[in-house]
Image: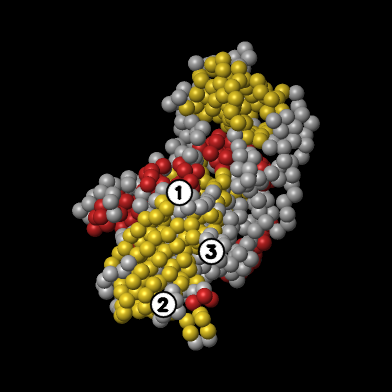
Amino acid sequence: MKKSILKYTVIAVLLIGGVYSCKENTEKNTDNLEAVVPMETAELVVDLKDTGIEIQPTMYGIFFEDINFAADGGLYAEMIKNRSFEFTLPKTGWVEPKSNRHSFNNESGIMSIVQYAGENTNRNYARVAVKNDEGYVLINEGFRGMGVKEGEKYNLSLKAKKGKDDIKNIKFQLVDSLDNVIGETTVAPDVSEWKTYEKQFSATKTEMKAKMKITFEGTGTIDLDMVSLFPEDTWKGRKNGLRKDLVQLLDDMNPGFLRFPGGCIVEGRTLARRYQWKKTVGPVADREILVNRWNTEFSHRPTPDYYQSFGLGFFEYFQLSEDMGAEPLPILGCGIACQFNTGELVPMDELDPYVQDALDLIEFANGNTSTPWGKVRADMGHPEPFNMKYIGIGNEQWGEVYIERYKVFEKAIKEKYPNIVIVSGSGPFPEGDYFEYGWEQLKEMKAEIVDEHYYKPPKWFRENATRYDDYDRNGPKVFAGEYAAQTVAIASPENKNSWDAALSEAAFMTGLERNAEVVHLTSYAPLMAHVDGWQWTPDMIWFNNLESVGTPNYQVQKLYATNAGTDLLSITEDGKPLTGQHNLYASAVKDQNTGELIIKVVNTSSSEQKVEMKPNGGSVANTGTIITLHHEDLDSENSFEAPENISPKSEEFKTEDGAINLALPAQSMTVIKVNII
Ligand code: AHR
C-alpha cells in the first residue's frame, strides 16, 4: 500500500470512530514568521495594459454550512429549540421545573408527547395535562438561551387544541437568569380544533440567555405544536426570517456566490440522514426535521441537541443569495454517504431518484410556474425564477465510486439543462492519490469546475501562493471551495482565528487572484460559529445570542471581495510575480466600473518594508487610498470586547513622480486604490 493511501485510511478510520479530527497535523504550529533583515526598497512594476483575463464576478464568495449552530440557533432567528417536539428525545429543550411537583405524588400537571395519526412529516405534538390550579409551568431553554433586546418586539405563535375541561390561559413570559419577567403575553385558547394563535410583545430588558416560561392557568388538557418565537426585527423585516446582524455581515462582503448547505452535511453520516432539499421547502411546519450530522461527530464537542428544523431551507437559501446579489450554488449528494463515516453507496442502478432530485432542483429554481417544482417556488412567494447557473454534485467524495456516479448526473443534467454549469469535487485533500485520481478523471471528462479543499497550517498558505501558477489554462476551472489556516491541526478545538492565520491566507489569496484565469470561485470555511454551540474551529464569524464579530479572516475575505476588480493586471519584481520573495506577496487588478487600479500587497515579515510601485503603459492619479489591515501580535484575534482589534484603516496617499511609494507595516495586508488616468 502506498504511504499516502495508508495515511488517508488511518484518517478515515479515526473519522468512522466518530472522531473527525484528522491526526494529520497534531503538532502545534509554531511556525511564527521569521524576522527578516529589511531590504532597501522593493521595486515593483504594475502593467496597466490588459492581460485579457477577467476576474470572475464569482471570484470571492461565501460557503454557508449548517455546522456550529450556524442555521438553527444562528442565522435562522427562531428562538425556541425543538418547537415541534420532534427531536429523537422529543422533550429536548423543554424543562418541567421542580416547582410543578409539590410532593412525591402530587404535581400540577404533566407534559407527554403524542404522535399524529397516520403519515405525517411533523410526527409529534405535546399534550399538557394540568391537574390543579397551582399553575403548571414549562420552560424552553432556547439555543444556549435566547438573546432578547430591550424595546424590541417579539412574535409568538403556536398551534393549540383544547382538550377536556378548561385551560383558560397560557401565559408566555421571557425571563432572565434570576427569573425576572422581561416580556410577556397571554394566549386564551378557545376551540377544540387545531388553531394557530399569534401574539406580539416587547421586551423590557436586554438579556443574552433568557428563557421562555409558559404557565398554564385552569385545569384540563391542551395540545401544543410549533411553539415559536422570533424577533420582529429580522433581515429585510421578513416574518420569521433570518438574524439581521449575521446576514448584514455576509452582505457587507458583497459575496459573488453562496455555496450551500454543505459540506459533509450534504452527504450525511448515513444515506438515510443525507440532506434532501425537497424536505426543506413548502410550509415550515411540514418540513421534516433531521438530526444534524455534527451532533455527535466530535467526541470532544458533543452537541446532542443539534438538529435541523429546515426553517432555513432551500427556498430561503435562494432568497438569501438573491438578496445579496450572489450566485446561488447548491451542492447535492450524489448517492454516497460521508466517506469519513459510513461511505454507504447507492447502487448504480438505483441512482435515478438522486439524479431526479438534481433535475427537479433546477426546475424549482428556474422553471416557470406551470412546472410542478416551479409552482412550489411560486406558491412560496417567488414566481420569478432564481436564475440559478451552477449546481454542485458531491462534496468531498473520492475514488471511482464518485466518478462513476458523477458521470450519470452530468449526463442527465447536461441533456436537459445544457447551460447549467456543474461543479465537481476532488475530495477532501489538496494533494495525494484521491486528489490526483479525481483531477485526472475530471480533466479527461472535460469537467467545467473542480472544487478543492484545504485545511492546512498557516505556513502552508504562505508557501503555496504559487499553487495555481502551473495549472492548465485549458483544463477545468478551479473552485477553492473550502479553505482556512489551522493554527494547531485540522479541526482541532484549539485552532484560533489569529492574525497569523488570516495574514497567511491573505498572502495565499494573492495567488488565487493572480491566477484568476483558472480560479473562478473561492470561499473560506466554515462560515459561522455560535460561541456556546460550535463543533469546528476556526470559523469566519463568531456570534452569541446577541452579537456577532468578524474575525481577522473575515476582514481579509471582505477586503478581497469588496476590492475584487474586473480585470487582472500583472505586478512584478524583476519580471517575476511576488510570491514570497522578501516575505512579500502581491496581485493587481483594474476595476472597469470605477476606473481604478487596485493592488493588494501582503508583508508577512516582522519588519516594515518599503515598496515602490511604478505603473507601466499608463499613469495613475496623484492621490489614492490605502487600506491597511495589520497587527504587531500574530496571536492577536478579534473578540466581542474588541471586535475592531484587527480591522481595516483607510488613509489617503500621494504618488511621487507617478510612482506609488509606501512603507508596508510589518505583518500587514495593504490594498492600494488609485484612479488610472
Ligand atoms: O467545513 C467543515 C467540513 O470540512 C465540511 O463539512 C467538509 O466539507 C470539510 O471536511
Task: Name above or below for residue 609 compared with residue 230.
Answer: above
Q: Can you identify the residue that label 1 sits on?
A: 151
Provide the secondary structure element on which disc 1 rests.
Answer: loop
Horizontal and vertical percent position of residue 630: 66, 35
Provide the secondary structure element on which disc 3 rests.
Answer: loop
The amino acid pointed to by label 1 is Gly
Q: State the CA–CA distance, disc 1 to disc 3.
A: 19 Å
Task: Name above or below for residue 160 compared with residue 265.
Answer: below
The amino acid pointed to by label 3 is Asp
Q: Can you identify the residue that label 2 sits on?
A: 133
Left or right of residue 545: residue 158: left
Colour scheme in the image? secondary structure
User: Is 53 in front, or is 154?
Assistant: 154
Residue in view at x 45 percent, y 57 percent: 183
Residue in view at x 67 percent, y 56 percent: 494
Q: Can you identify the residue that label 3 sits on?
A: 179
